[in-house]
């Protein structure tokens, strides 16, 4: 257990439905990341936050995807009008970024496995 | 674009040493990380190299050669629990920490 939690762990939905996932990072971590992982592949970066500010979004993140991190604590990732191609494991990670440090280890949560029927 | 190449599968005997290679082509390079992921589990951090050379952490070591755009993860005294997927990941821009992952190497340790 890394200290990062995600909910739900599994989600099955029908095509066209909206889904929302939640990530609770390690409490003192100021950075939060979302990745997507499909079977046999490495995680693909989607977006990240520094506190409550969303600083970067991958071009993988279509306009059906939206992420928030109100108050700089937990984060939600919403997918609207789901498609079968959205089926994947959605991973959240957090890290502590300090001024002057060059690298911050990312701690991953267990992921939410989404299946779109 | 970014690309990271790793062997897809490696098999090694318990107690042996195994090396997992990673070559990368990225628009920028600010460090190479290695993560371990067991089936159904979360990726967990193993090591990070920003500069050339060898970093050692217990049974795991990681090496980087920036001039060759190459790194490797060395696992010594293999144990059955080391059977997992191993990913190299590049930090491609300064100031940002989002990682670009390779496709992973599935390590199987046999008795």
Image (cartoon, coloured by chain):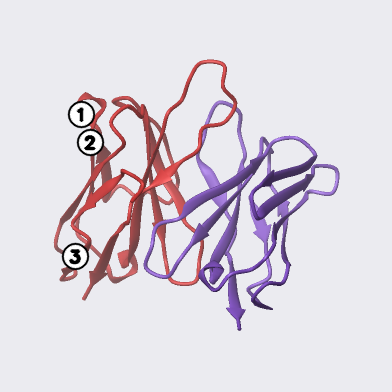
Chain colours: A red, B purple
Gap in angstroms between the C-alphas marked 1 and 3: 23 Å
Q: Is residue A33 left or right of residue B87?
A: left
Residue visible at 45% across and 47% down in the picture: A59
Q: Where does the image place residue B86, in percent across and percent down from the top left? A: 57, 62
Residue at image mark 1: A70
Gap in angstroms between the C-alphas marked 2 and 1: 7 Å
Which numbered circle lies on residue A74?
Answer: 2
Residue at image mark 3: A11
Judge if badges 1 and 3 mark residues of a common chain: yes
Q: Where does the image place residue A110, in percent across and percent down from the top left? A: 32, 56
Residue visible at 42% across and 43% down in the picture: A107
Residues at marks 2 and 1 touching, judged by CB atoms closer than 8 Å: yes
Residues at marks 2 and 3 touching, judged by CB atoms closer than 8 Å: no
Q: Residues within 10 Å of mark 2 (few under 14, many from 20)?
A: many
2 vs 1, front mark: 2
Judge if badges 2 and 1 mark residues of a common chain: yes
| SS under mark 3 | strand
């Amino acid at each position: 257990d890394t200290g990062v939690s995600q909910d739900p762990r599994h989600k099955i939905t029908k095509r066209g439905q909206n889904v929302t996932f939640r990530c609770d990072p390690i409490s003192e971590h100021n950075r939060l990341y979302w990745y997507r992982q499909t079977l046999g592949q490495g995680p693909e970066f989607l977006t990240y936050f520094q506190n409550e500010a969303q600083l970067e979004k991958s071009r993988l993140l279509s306009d059906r995807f939206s992420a928030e991190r109100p108050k700089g604590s937990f984060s939600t990732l919403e997918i609207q009008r789901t498609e079968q191609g959205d089926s994947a494991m959605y991973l959240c990670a957090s890290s502590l970024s300090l001024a002057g440090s060059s690298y911050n280890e990312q701690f991953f949560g267990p992921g939410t496995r989404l299946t779109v029927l | 674009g970014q690309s990271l190449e790793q062997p897809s599968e490696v098999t090694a005997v318990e107690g042996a040493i195994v090396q997992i290679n990673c070559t990368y082509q990225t628009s920028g390079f600010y460090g190479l990380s290695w993560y371990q992921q067991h089936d159904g589990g979360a990726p967990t951090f193993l090591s990070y190299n920003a500069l050339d050379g060898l970093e050692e952490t217990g049974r795991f070591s990681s090496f980087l050669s920036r001039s060759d755009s190459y790194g490797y993860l060395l696992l010594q005294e293999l144990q059955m629990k080391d059977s997992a997927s191993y990913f190299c990941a590049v930090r491609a821009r300064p100031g940002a920490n989002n990682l670009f992952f390779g496709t992973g190497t599935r390590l199987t340790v046999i008795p």
